[in-house]
Amino acid sequence: MTETVLFDRAAVLDPVAGALARDRRVLVRGETIAAVGAGIEAPAGARVIDLAGKTLMPGLIDCHVHVNAHSGDLSGLADESPAYVAVKAAVELRAMLHRGFTTVRDPGGADFGIADAVAEGLIDGPRLFFGGKALSQTGGHVDMRPRGRSVRDDHQCCPDLGVVCDGVDEVRKAAREQLRTGAHHVKIMLSGGVASPTDRIDSTGFAMEEIRAIVEEAEAANRYVAGHAYTARAINRGLEAGVRSIEHGNLLDESSVELFLEYDAFLVPTLVTYERMAVEGAEFGLPARNLEKNAFVLDAGLQALRMAHEAGVNLCYGSDLLGGMRRHQLEEFRIRGAVLPAADVIRSATVTAARLLGEEGRIGRIAPGALADLLVVDGDPLADLGLLTDPDTHLRLVMQGGAVKADRLT
């Protein structure tokens, strides 16, 4: 339920400027921010919340989550009950919201049903930008069949993360099917990955004419393509074909950076997932063969992040954690903060992420007319990013669209 709320004596975090504006008032009416300033009067009947210098910052945006992936063994998802997977997803979505993520993007797995359940308030969770099922060629990253199995069930109601398609006609139809359900983007597998059984990390996915066909279909629907890719070769093929965001990108090189800048594309690193898979992937179902592939990309990620940042590439926050490892979603702040300024890491989870989602000015900022997605944090995250990684201690209030979802102020 929304109400009129006036936050008083707030230190407002502006992610664009990378600075705090102290002793400000922020007025929330209904779902949106009505005013930000120093001399705002409290309307009659408004709830006044005295923050006494605490930080008021925009709600966080994670551009790479998989709400269906309640286990590290992704090959088993297709055989599970969709109802069971949906309930598990609802539990995880609520946990994400209580970590401070008021918006997330799911590039593989989440569908219109779980997104509608969140939008209608049937379950608590971040605003969900879903891509439906990710597209992969035979033997690609979401082809979860072991080598000896020929049959695959790509039925829409199977709660796995992707669909296999080959050839220009098939990929066009597959993209159209996802867009038909209301997907906000189309996810494609431009290279092999860690969690799949038969592909190689350094392989490429789809022929160029297939990638271009998928991009054409997304653009025809005023949507975009997100591409899973690790190596420079896979990244560059995607960018040259019009892919808007590259997921992971651990093995990019200078030629990739040039293409990111040329096309004003986005990079969504997901460094925390490799760290956690190395530590506890086996505990949460990741097979040994996949752990071996994880080591291949683990060490390169920070170097790629630093190179992209120094060149001015658009960077967005992503976590990509599986199963019980999703509790570490906020640890990406710590990892990036070791090599990047805090202000830039926060931008990746606010204003830059909002631009990728096509929601610039609506989320990711504290400004009149924006949705009232707000966090109250003890301390200054610009001075200590670690504050964001410990919500039980430092996250005092979560507001989403003007409704208070968690309140630890009293």
Image: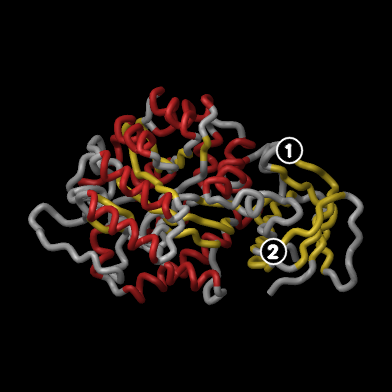
Q: Which mark is residue 395?
A: none
Q: Is residue 313 visible?
A: yes
Q: Which amino acid lies under the numbered mark 2 shown in the image of this protein?
A: Arg
For residue 150, side relative to residue 112 (left or right): left
> Callout 2: few (<14), some (14-19), or many (20+) C-alpha neighbours within 10 Å?
few
The image position of residue 90, as x and y in percent, is: 46, 70
Compare residues 294 and 224 and report the one nearer the observer. 224
The answer to whether marks 2 and 1 mark residues whose Cβ atoms lie closer than 8 Å is no
Q: In the picture, which quadrant includes the N terminus?
A: bottom right
Compare residues 185 and 379 and report the one nearer the observer. 185
User: Which residue is at 52% across, 63% downward?
Assistant: 95
Q: Which amino acid lies under the numbered mark 1 shown in the image of this protein?
A: Ala
Depicted 254 relative to depicted 113: above or below: above
Extreme residue toward the left, this view: 148
Please give the residue where the numbered disc 2 appears in the rendered image.
408
The image position of residue 84, as x and y in percent, is: 35, 74
Depicted 247 relative to depicted 84: above or below: above
Residue 51, located in which quarter of the rendered image? bottom right
- Closer mark to the observer between disc 2 and disc 1: 1
Depicted 252 relative to depicted 74: above or below: above
The image position of residue 208, as x and y in percent, is: 27, 39
> Callout 1: few (<14), some (14-19), or many (20+) C-alpha neighbours within 10 Å?
some
Label 2 element class: loop
Label 1 element class: strand
Residue 110, located in which quarter of the rendered image? bottom left
Depicted 33 relative to depicted 112: above or below: above
**Mark 2 vs 1, N-terminal side:** 1
Please give the residue where the numbered disc 1 appears in the rendered image.
19
The image position of residue 372, as x and y in percent, is: 69, 60
- The alpha-carbon separation of the residues under discs 2 and 1 comes to 25 Å
